[in-house]
Image (cartoon, rainbow, N blue to C red):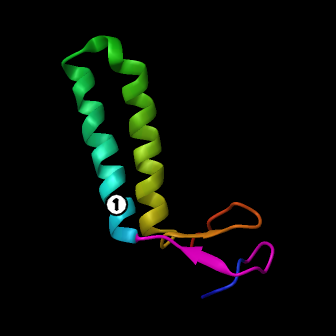
Amino acid sequence: MPDCPTCGTELRQKNRVLLLAIGGVMITAAAFALVVPALLVPAILLVIVGAYVIVWATLGKAMWCRNCKKFPLF
């Protein structure tokens, strides 16, 4: 495993496929706000968090540092 560029500790890797699936489900679930307009604010939050998880799984290679709580973009 590579080391964290910020603090130098070992990076942990999560399951990339699972993270991509979770991000996709979160973004797809936000489409439910088209049916129920009262859910617009939670839908916006779901899209933001889902996009963050997808970026973490792709650009961050699903790695994160337990010490400084960051994920480096490789």
Residue 55 in the image, given as x and y percentages of width and height: 45, 59
Name the residue rendered at 41%, 71% in the picture. Answer: 15
The residue wearing badge 1 is 20
Which secondary structure lies at badge 1? helix
Q: Is residue 37 above or below residue 19?
A: above
Name the residue rendered at 41%, 48% in the picture. Answer: 51
Quarter containing the C terminus: bottom right
Amino acid on which the number 1 mark rests in the picture: Leu
Name the residue rendered at 45%, 54% in the picture. Answer: 53
Q: Quadrant of residue 2?
A: bottom right
Q: Is residue 74 above or below residue 47?
A: below
Q: Main secondary structure of the magenta part?
A: loop
Q: Is residue 32 magenta?
A: no
Q: Is residue 36 above or below residue 71?
A: above
Query: Residue placed farthest to the left in the image?
Result: 35
Residue 70 in the image, given as x and y percentages of width and height: 67, 62
Q: Is residue 35 left or right of residue 21?
A: left
Q: Quadrant of residue 43?
A: top left
Residue 26 in the image, given as x and y percentages of width and height: 34, 42
Range covered by the magenta-colored residues: 5-15
